[in-house]
Image (cartoon, rainbow, N blue to C red):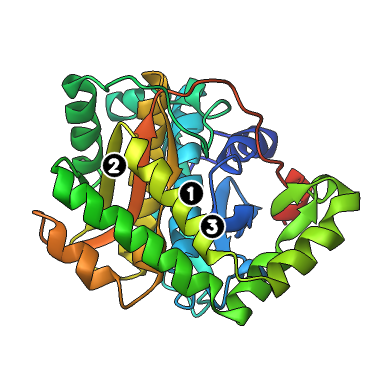
Amino acid sequence: MMNSDKALITEQQIKLLLSYAVLAPSSHNTQPWRFEITDGTVFMFADETRALAISDPNSRELYISCGCALMNLRAAAAHEGFSISINVEPASGDDALLAVISFNKQHSSSLKDAELFKSIESRRTYRKNFASKDIPNEILDSLRMTASKEDTWLEFITLEESRRIVAELISEGDSIQWSNPNWRKELASWILPRHQGGGLTMHPFLVPVARAIVRTLDMGMGIAAKNKQLTAKSPALAVLGTANDNVTDWLKTGQSLEKVLLSAHSKGLQAAYFNQPIQVASLRPKLQSLLKKTGVPQVVISLGFPKDQIGASPRRRLDEVIK
């Protein structure tokens, strides 16, 4: 779908919007997206060179990550006075083409997206214990509503026994993944020096040692224990899901996830991901059986009030992701 008003938005304005889109979260901070700009229209592609063949063999999380970037683009566009039209099933022989985005004059339905803009730069994945503070029910209700407006559902795991079982599934997923040498090798390959702008970053001098340790040692028992503890202490544990399980649903999941994360952050919350029961195929039905909602679980998140501020994960330069 081409933009009929070529003067409506400039290439520089589009690049500004994309600079916020690329701040979206992604598995292992892979940032698996690339963009092309033609006559005021953005073409979004999956960057399959950054796919995770072992932990994400169907590229489900890759598409979810790209959906998160689409949500940031929606919020940034609304903030700058535009609404956008997204065609997520373009008629094209290019399987990597995920969406065609055109820009329009802002209308009232995009104003709520604009309210999320201020949360984009300060949203973080919080991998620590949250503060011991309950989340008000009205906030949880608003997040459920946020997800439902994106044609997804968000179910909070509230029963103590259900939370215990979810924690056990997360722990079991950790053990299964870490016991797989190929999974560890893939994880190690994404440990990168910070200046490279992506991946799981650390000081350059530490990268070779960290990679060797991850490749060689099965640390599943320790990681499982840590994640079990983090899950148990999380003020809220939730599952985001969809009716079906295809590329369109995964992109929808990503947009909903980022909208929930930005909405939560606007209320002082941060989140962390515990997707092991979904990443390990044998555990996904067990997770699904715990839920009241019908459909397919896509993401497991914990939510809470952070105890402190944490820095942002690095991002690739914009010219690396735009053609």
The residue pinned by badge 3 equals: 222
Amino acid under disc 1: Lys
Q: Position of residue 17 (x, y in %)?
A: 59, 35
> Which numbered dot is residue 313?
none
Q: Position of residue 174 (x, y in %)?
A: 46, 64
Residue contact between numbered discs 1 and 3, judged by CB atoms under 8 Å: yes
Q: Hey, which quadrant is residue 31 in on the image?
A: bottom right
Amino acid type, residue under disc 3 in the picture: Gly
Q: Amino acid at mark 2?
A: Leu
- Crowding near pointer 1: few (<14 within 10 Å), some, many (20+)? some
Q: Which residue is mark 2?
A: 237
Direction from residue 149 to residue 294 in the image, left or right: left
Write down the residue under mark 1: 226
- The spot of residue 140 in percent (x, y) is 22, 29
Q: Earlier in the sequence, mark 3 or mark 2?
A: 3
- Of marks 1 and 2, the one in the foreground: 1
Looking at the picture, does residue 209 appear above or below residue 111?
Answer: below
- Is residue 106 in sight in this rendering? no
**Residue 98 appears at what percent x and percent y?**
47, 64
For marks 1 and 2, the one nearer the N-term is 1
304 vs 194, left or right, is: left
Secondary structure under the numbered disc 3 in the rendered image: helix
Q: Residue at x 65, y 37 (%)?
A: 19
Number of marks present in the image shown: 3
Q: Residue at x 34, y 51 (%)?
A: 300
Could you tell me how far apart the alpha carbons at marks 1 and 2 are, in whole angstroms?
16 Å
